[in-house]
Amino acid sequence: MTKTKSVFASPLMSPKEAAAVTTMSRPLLRLMSIEGKFPKPRQIGQRRIAYVRAEVESWVASKVSA
């Protein structure tokens, strides 16, 4: 039996993944989102948050083009 990698990209990304994409720390992203300088994470469970991938990618693109 072989394992195949899914080609489906989740519309959400974990704080760890958002930190890796932006090259910023998770605490800094949290502070920036509180200040309105980064997309706000969504509560997806009682103790779990996630960022909307499209919002993070749009934010990165705006910083690259600036």
Image (spheres, rainbow, N blue to C red):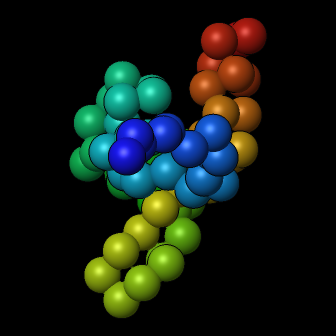
| Residue occupying image coordinates x 50% and y 51% | 13
List x then y, in percent, for residue 23.
36, 23
- In which image quadrant can residue 22 be found? top left
Name the foreground residue: 52 vs 29. Answer: 52
Specify the farthest residue to the front. Answer: 1
Specify the farthest residue to the top. Answer: 65
| Residue occupying image coordinates x 70% and y 22% | 61
Vertical relation: 27 (above or below) 48: above
List x then y, in percent, for residue 11.
65, 54
Vertical relation: 8 (above or below) 46: above
Is residue 38 visible in the rendered structure shown here?
no
List x then y, in percent, for residue 59.
65, 33
Name the foreground residue: 34 vs 49. Answer: 49
Specify the farthest residue to the bottom. Answer: 46
12 to the left or right of 55:
left
Disc count in the image? Answer: 0
Is residue 63 visible in the rendered structure shown here?
yes
| Residue occupying image coordinates x 40% and y 40% | 2
Image quadrant in which the C terminus is located: top right
Name the foreground residue: 45 vs 38. Answer: 45
11 to the left or right of 51:
right
List x then y, in percent, for residue 21.
45, 28
Name the foreground residue: 15 vs 36. Answer: 15
| Residue occupying image coordinates x 65% and y 12% | 64
